[in-house]
Amino acid sequence: MKQSCLTNTPKHKNEYSFINQLINSLTHFRMKRYINYFLTAVCGLVFLPACNDNEIEYNKGEEPLTLTLSNTTIVLDIRHPNDEALTFSWTTGTNAGTNSAINYLLQIDRQGNQFESGLNIELGRRIYTHKYTCSQLNDLLLGDFNVLPNEAIALEARIVAMITSENVSDQSSEVIPFTVTAYQPVSANLFIIGSATTGGWNLDKATAMNPISEEAGGFVVTSELLQGDFKFITTTEDFLPSYNRDANSTETKLIYRQSDNEPDEKFVITSSGRYRIAVNIIDLTIEIEELEPSALPRYDKMYFVGDFTGWSFIEMTKDPFNPFVFRYGAVLNGSGDLDFKFGTSPGDWSNMLHPTIANAPMTHTAAMFDDAGDNKWKLTPEQNNKAYKIAIDITEDMESMTMAEYTPWTTIFVIGDASPIGWSLGDRAQTQMTKSVDDYTYTWTGTLSAGEIKFKCSDDTSWDNDDIHTWYMAPDFDLKITPNTDMVLTSNLQGTRGSDRKWIVEEGGTYVITINQLTEKIRFDKQ
């Protein structure tokens, strides 16, 4: 049996001598009636530190252990996955005055199963509530209880209090029955694929759609579409399941397709252009809007501003393929929690682009323009002093910010008939670029002839132009270099994937080529 925290042991002999001296002193000042109170306080201070705090749970009285549920008939709502669905609350129970700690165990099982094969959730000590959101409880039902969607399951729960003292038995609350109806979850990812897209019917080149913040099942994308057709898929590994056009509906609606035996109707684009497509795979709705060819972004320039810049405005680079997207790459140095947001004009603090919540983490993508509040993104001390690439999209009603830590390529080769090795990948070592002033900057000095040029980023002999084999390319086809000037650097993963965009060297000679992978800039300095 565990000793009480107030057990007298030989090592406390000196402490008791000290206490007796204090009692005598207090008696001298006619304070005998306070001695008992003082003695109790001193004993606590002297002896309690010698006990393990995890074992202490002061007298909890004799209140029965009682479990309460916030709701006993629950229908989970797929449209509100983050809403609170169910809260278990319980009283402390009793440790019978032993001052022993109490561990709590929440048990959930099918009704009538006597808790023989359900869930045993160890909650630890000093915990008196346990909560589930709609999505958490739905995952539990589908995964642990194999519940079918849209069918109610009868469950029951109890809380067990386990006292660490050997002299006190475990206690169990009364069993509380409840029912829950689960839902069929939908995919967290959605892609558009088809002859109307730049990637065609290639699964690897399907266009990812953006989840709509605060709209369960909602996705949106703004993209150039060609004359052709398209549908939606949930993975780039397979054409099924998919969301197709519902040919039996009088409205333009989606239908969920799970088998090749089901109709494969598609949506049709009759004229090439820039389109905004918004869908909701819960409501099976779709909106296809052709944007005006002359439509331009509200701002021609955007600026990164925050603790990392001393709150100076640093101009971002406009994406060469989408005028609504701006990019910024840098090592974000600093200490502590550091904030940032985006401006539209140097020194102008009005109508800035900021997150939709305060103290947003770097993973929060939803953004907005307005002067209400002063929300900012925040990096933690652990996230500082690293290289990041940031992209913002200022498309109206679809504003977003994405950022990711960046790792540069370490092998880059100059390839093309303008280079000394022409198109011979076997001789690529002769034109390998070398690391320069930092981990992101690489240079090469040599003779270029008039002709085409691009840059291979993987040390192999493959000519594949895909996600695995990255090439640095020009932002447009047959783009003439401008010597001694910073130019935008892109890759084969940007714009229309698979495109073979090369630079054109018009005048041969000796050049120093400098690539900064982080800022996405390239220079051809003619010597």
Image: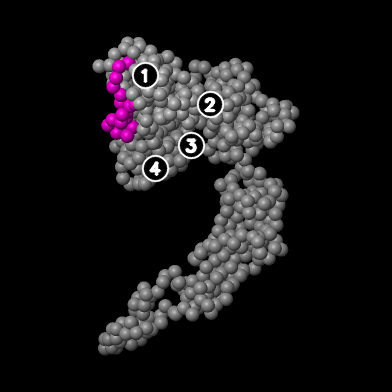
Three-letter code, disc 4: Lys
Dot 3 lies on which element?
loop
| Rendered residue at 46%/40% (across/down) | 364
Q: Residues within 10 Å of mark 2 (few under 14, many from 20)?
A: many
Q: Residue 22, how many percent across, how many down? A: 28, 84
Q: Which residue does the numbered mark 1 point to in the structure image?
A: 421
Q: Which residue does the numbered mark 2 point to in the structure image?
A: 222
| Rendered residue at 57%/61% (across/down) | 121
| Rendered residue at 53%/26% (across/down) | 222
Q: CA distance from mark 4 to mark 1?
A: 47 Å
Q: Residue 510, how many percent across, how many down? A: 28, 16
What span is colored magenta in the figure? Answer: 432-448
Q: Residue 151, how many percent across, how many down? A: 71, 49
**Circles 3 and 2: CB distance less than 8 Å?**
no
| Rendered residue at 55%/18% (across/down) | 273
Q: Which comes sooner in the sequence, label 2 or label 1?
A: 2
Three-letter code, disc 2: Thr
**Circles 2 and 4: CB distance less than 8 Å?**
no
Q: Which comes sooner in the sequence, label 4 or label 1?
A: 4
- Marking on residue 366: 3
